[in-house]
């Protein structure tokens, strides 16, 4: 019998969902959720600031070209400075918005909320960027699969740190003239990554470290031909300032778009841990943990030494949820059955992150004995 009640009442908020209804539900719930968020976040966008983790981050923006049918691209461009008086960092911030001009897209230059040396890779930056991205998706019609991260000098430090730990939010990233400090590249498996550094940029050995990071990415790609896409450019004769040659990063990044449901994921926890990365969820993350997960047809294989429990965020974009899903966790078969779609999961996923392209329609908790 055809249902004449509103869509959500017809299916219930926790009942089993067929595939097409799950797709429709994501679209409908996203429209409702985005409408509410737009009202809530509008004052932030009008004030050109975002507030999260007890910090306020101001930003400047410029728009280039014409909006594609699929939505704008977004370039988050982090300024240099750090460990300097506010007026110095303000000057770097106002200069940053002038550096890069894509043929299409919105360029946003956020102002770091602190003036410390590590202004772009403290823990609050992740929360601020999450909120900034959500605001632009909801209020500026940004395509969540076309969001790019870049930064110069201290902003490059931030790219080294943020890109691996937030790779599931971005389509590509480019590091200009920065230093990685203790960053680890493992999380870049699905994120195209550029390195730009002047040949004579010897302060803090930036030039040497940039070359070593490029070599490390070469090694990772050699062992995983479908992952770790990268390009390293050491600009001959250049010092810390590369005379604008790094602008070539913009069209290179723009060729790529995010895959929110990759068939292989490498998740490494830095000092700033996360509970979610692509389709993996770990409610008790610990610094230094590494998870490697692959999907081959209906089989998910997960290697996570020292981890006994995970939640898998599933979608028909990853596996066929009408068929049994097999999970091999640390060498042990822990599941081999259908995982039902659920409207409650869709709703919770969108509430957790305003990103309809990565919304899960089923959850599976797995545990080794």
Image: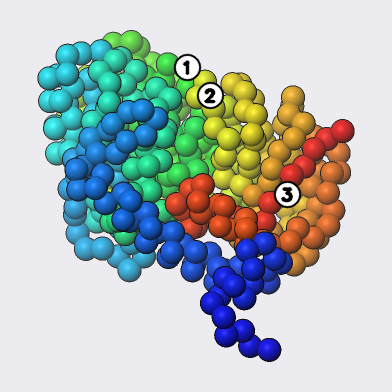
Q: Which of marks 3 and 1 is in front?
A: 3
Point 83% across, 35% down: residue: 368
Label 2 element class: loop
In-front residue for pair 15/22: 15
Q: Residue 182 has which mark?
A: 1
Residue 51 shown left or right of residue 6 in the figure: left
Q: Is residue 218 visible?
A: no
Residue 151: name its quadrant: top left
Q: Which residue is drawn at 26% across and 44% down?
A: 44
> From mark 3 to mark 2, how far is it between C-alphas?
25 Å
Does 192 appear above or below 120?
Answer: below
Residue 311 picture location, percent across and down: 69, 43
The image position of residue 335, as x and y in percent, is: 83, 49
Image quadrant assignment for residue 320: bottom right
Q: Earlier in the sequence, mark 3 or mark 1?
A: 1
- How far is the residue under mark 3 from the one under mark 1? 33 Å
What residue sits 81% from the left and 43% below the top? Answer: 328
Q: Look at the numbered discs 2 and 1 and tell me whether their residues touch, using CB distance below 8 Å.
A: yes
Q: Position of residue 288 (x, y in %)?
A: 61, 21
Callout 2: few (<14), some (14-19), or many (20+) C-alpha neighbours within 10 Å? many
Report whether 349 appears left or right of 99: right
**Quadrant occupied by the C terminus:** top right
Q: How far apart are marks 2 and 1 (CA)?
A: 9 Å
For mark 1, give the secondary structure.
loop
- In the picture, which quadrant includes the N terminus? bottom right
User: Disc count in the image?
Assistant: 3
Image disc number at residue 364: 3
Considering depth in this image, is 124 or 171 the residue closer to the camera? 124
Q: Nearer the viewer, mark 3 or mark 2?
A: 3
- Say which residue label 2 marks: 270
- In the rendered structure, are the residues bearing label 3 and label 2 in contact, judged by CB atoms less than 8 Å apart? no
Q: Name the spot of residue 287 as percent of width and height, x first.
A: 59, 21
């Amino acid at each position: 019998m055809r249902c004449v009640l509103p869509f959500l009442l017809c299916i219930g908020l926790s009942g089993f969902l067929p595939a097409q209804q799950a797709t429709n539900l994501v679209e409908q719930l996203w429209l409702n959720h985005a409408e509410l968020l737009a009202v809530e976040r509008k004052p932030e966008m009008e004030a050109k600031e975002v507030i999260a983790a007890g910090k306020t981050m101001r930003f400047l923006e410029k728009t280039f070209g014409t909006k594609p049918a699929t939505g704008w691209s977004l370039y988050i461009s982090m300024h240099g400075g750090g460990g300097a008086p506010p007026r110095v960092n303000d000057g770097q911030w106002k200069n940053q918005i002038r550096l890069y001009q894509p043929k299409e897209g919105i360029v946003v230059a956020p102002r770091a909320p602190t003036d410390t040396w590590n202004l772009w890779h403290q823990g609050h930056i992740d929360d601020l960027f999450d909120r900034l991205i959500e605001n632009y998706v909801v209020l500026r019609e940004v395509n969540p699969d076309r969001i790019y991260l870049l930064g110069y000098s201290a902003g490059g430090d931030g790219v080294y740190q943020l890109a691996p730990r937030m790779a599931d939010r971005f389509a590509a990233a480019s590091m200009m003239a920065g230093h990685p400090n203790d960053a680890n590249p493992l999380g870049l498996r699905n994120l195209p990554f550029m390195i730009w550094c002047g040949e004579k940029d010897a302060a803090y050995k930036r030039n040497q470290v940039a070359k070593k990071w490029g070599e490390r990415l070469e090694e990772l790609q050699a062992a995983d031909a479908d992952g770790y896409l990268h390009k390293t450019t050491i600009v001959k004769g250049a010092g810390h300032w590369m005379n604008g040659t790094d602008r070539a990063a913009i069209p290179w990044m723009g060729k790529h778009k995010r895959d929110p449901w990759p068939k292989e994921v490498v998740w490494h926890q830095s000092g700033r841990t996360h509970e979610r990365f692509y389709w993996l969820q770990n409610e008790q993350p610990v610094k230094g943990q590494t998870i490697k997960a692959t999907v081959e047809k209906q089989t998910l294989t997960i290697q996570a030494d020292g981890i006994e429990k995970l939640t898998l965020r599933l979608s028909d974009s990853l596996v066929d949820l009408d068929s049994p899903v097999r999970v091999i966790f640390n060498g042990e078969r822990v599941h081999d059955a259908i995982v039902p779609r659920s409207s409650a999961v869709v709703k919770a996923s969108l509430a957790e992150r305003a990103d309809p392209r990565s919304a899960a329609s089923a959850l599976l908790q797995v545990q080794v004995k």
